[in-house]
Image (spheres, grey):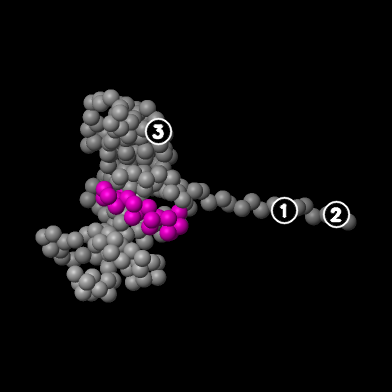
Amino acid sequence: MESKPTVFTLKKVEPTYRLFAICPGGLDVVLKKEIEALPAKILATYPGGVEFEGKLDLAYRATLKLRTASRVLLLLKDFKNIFKPEELYEAIQKIDWDRTFSPPSTFAVYVTESQSEAKERRIPVNPQFWALKAKDAIVDQFTKRFNLRPDIDRTDPDITIRLHLHDQRLKVYLDLSGESMHERGYRGKTLEAPIKERLHFLRSFLRFGHTLNRSSAHRNPDCTRLVSLSIWIHELERS
C-alpha cells in the first residue's frame, strides 16, 4: 500500500519591530512605566522618549493607550556614517518604499538632528534641505519603478516619515500616530492656553499614581485622552 507524502505546514513568524515613543522632556520616567505595563520590552530611555520593541499589535496598542507619549514611531531602517545630503539620498533609496505605501498616497518627510556633547561640532544640518533630499529619493524610486509619483502633503499626509540623525547615524521612522496623540481631532474649539491631556495625566499620576491602573476610568478609549471626571472632582476637593 502506497503511503501518503507528509505535508509540513510552516508557521508564519510575525516580525518584531523597534518602536520609539516621543514625549516632552521630563516625562520619560512615567512613559517608561506606561510602556512596561502594556507590556513591552524596554530597549533604552532618553530625555525625549523611550525605545522599545514588540509585534505590530503592540504598536497599535501603544498608540491607543499611552497617555504621556505624543507620537509612536516604527523604525524602518537605520544607517551609519551619513555626513552629506547625497549620502542621505543614497540611503533612502535603499529602502523599498512600495512596501510601505503606494503612489496614490500622499506623504511628508521631517528631519531632526542631535549630537553628543563629546563629539566635535560640525556644520549643522539644514532640516528642510535634508527633508527635500529624502523626499526626492522616495519620489525618484517610485517614478523609476512604476512611472508614478506620490504627492507631497505637509498639511494632512497619508504617510509621515520622520528621520533622525544622531552622530551621523540616521534612523528612518514611520509615524504611526498622524497628528500629535494629545489632539486626536476631537477638539472643536480650544481656549488660549488649554492644558494638554498628557500634562494633566502627569499631575494625576504623581498625586494618585497608586490608583491609576488599567481598569480605572483614566483609560483612554478611542485615543481621545479624555480624563476621568471623578479624578478632577477628587483633585479639586483636595486642593
* Closer to us: 9 or 167: 167
Choose between 113 and 126: the one closer to the eye: 113
Residue 32 point in image, percent of width and height: 37, 52
The residue that disc 2 covers is 2
Bounds of the magenta span? 22-40
What crowding class fits label 2: few (fewer than 14 Cα within 10 Å), some (14-19), or many (20 or more)? Answer: few
Does residue 144 sit above or below 36 in this rendering?
Answer: above
Q: Nearer the viewer, residue 85 or 165?
A: 165
Amino acid found under the numbered disc labelled 3: Phe
Q: Given this view, does label 1 or label 2 mark the residue nearer the observer?
A: 1
Q: Which residue ends up furthest to the front in the rendered image?
A: 238
Mark 1 vs mark 3: in front: 3
| Mark 3 crowd level (few <14, some 14–19, many ≥20, 10 Å Cα) | some
Q: Is residue 151 visible?
A: no
Please name the residue shown 85% across and 54% down the image. Answer: 2
| Mark 1, other Cα within 10 Å: few <14 / some 14–19 / many ≥20 | few
Q: Earlier in the sequence, mark 1 or mark 3?
A: 1
Q: Secondary structure at mark 1?
A: loop
**Vertical side of 69 occupied by 228: above or below:** below
Query: Which quadrant holds the C terminus?
Result: bottom left
Residue 96 - label: none
Task: Decide whether residue 45 is among the magenta residues.
Answer: no
- Disc number placed over residue 79 in the picture, else none: 3
Left or right of residue 182: residue 32: right
Q: Locate residue 38: give its quadrant.
A: bottom left
